[in-house]
Amino acid sequence: MRSFTFLVKGMALAAVVLMNAQCTGEQTQAPAAEKQDTAAASGELKLAYVRVDTLLSQYNLSKDLNEIMLRKEENARATLNEKGRDLQNQMAEFQRKLQNNAFVSEERARQENDRLQKVQQNLQELQTRLASELDAEGKKNTQILHDSLQNFLKIYNKTHRYSMILSNAGMESLLYADPAYDITDEVVKGLNARYKKASK
């Protein structure tokens, strides 16, 4: 669930960046007179918005990436749990031996204590490394989704000619919108059709 939330936030940020980049890019790519369509020429601003949470929950690429992330998280958790249980068992055995004076010498008990501390340190390092790898994977997946959406919207907008496509992912980007301007279903349908073709 954490990775899905991360992807939602990442897509919201990506959508805002995309919107800004497209607006800036369109202004610098060609003179205004060449780029104006009928809506812009008449002073109208043609807007639409996408419900990012719906897009992420229904876009098959997003679902696939999320499923992969959940499996990786579960594998990491299982690995850490297994190693943690093993360490607990070793520490309990150490305590039992210590209480029963089962060590040959005090030096041997110290060596075993040092070894267990090293195992514990290795486990903490593994936990940090796995968390870092999952974070990097989440960022990579967010970038994949961002690129896919950006590429699709460039093609989609050639025929629909919106001045701006917003996201409703955060209060900063969209406070109110008439549902008539919601193009989420069209975008999800188009993305899924494109993803199906690409995966064949």
Image (spheres, grey):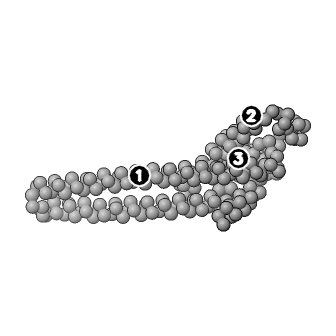
Instruction: Say which amino acid is labelled 3.
Output: Ser
Q: Name which residue type carries label 1.
A: Arg
Q: Position of residue 188 (x, y in %)?
A: 72, 58
Left/right of residue 64 with respect to residue 181 in the rendered view: left
Of circles 3 and 2, which is in front? 2
Per the image, label 2 sits on a secondary structure element best described as: helix
> How would you rate the neighbour count of disc 1 (Cα within 10 Å): few for under 14, some for 14-19, many for 20 or more?
few
- Dot 3: element: strand
Q: Amino acid at mark 2?
A: Thr
Query: Is 39 in front, or is 112?
Result: 39
Using the image, determine if residue 147 lies above or below residue 188: above
Task: Determine crowd level at label 3: few under 14, some 14-19, many 20+ residues with C-alpha closer than 10 A.
Answer: many
**Residue that label 1 marks:** 129
Image location of residue 198, percent across then percent down: 67, 61
**C-alpha span from label 2 to label 1:** 43 Å
Relative image position of residue 41 (x, y in whole percent): 88, 37
Residue 89 visible in this rendered orientation of the protein: yes
For residue 63, the mark is: none
Residue 95 image offset from top left, x and y in percent: 20, 60
Q: Name which quarter of the figure residue 77 lies in.
A: bottom left
- The reply to whether callout 1 and callout 3 are in contact (CB within 8 Å) is no
- What's the mark number on residue 167? 3
Question: Which numbered disc, 2 or 1, marks the residue closer to the eye?
Answer: 2
Quadrant where the image shows the N terminus: bottom right
**Cβ–Cβ under 8 Å for marks 2 and 1:** no
Task: Name the residue located 12 percent from the left edge and 64 percent from the top edge.
Answer: 102
Q: Look at the image and tell me whether residue 53 can be seen.
A: no
Residue 67 horizontal side relative to residue 27, left or right = left
**Which residue does the numbered mark 2 point to in the structure image?**
28
Q: Residue at x 74, y 55 (%)?
A: 187
Residue depicted at x 72% and y 41%: 22
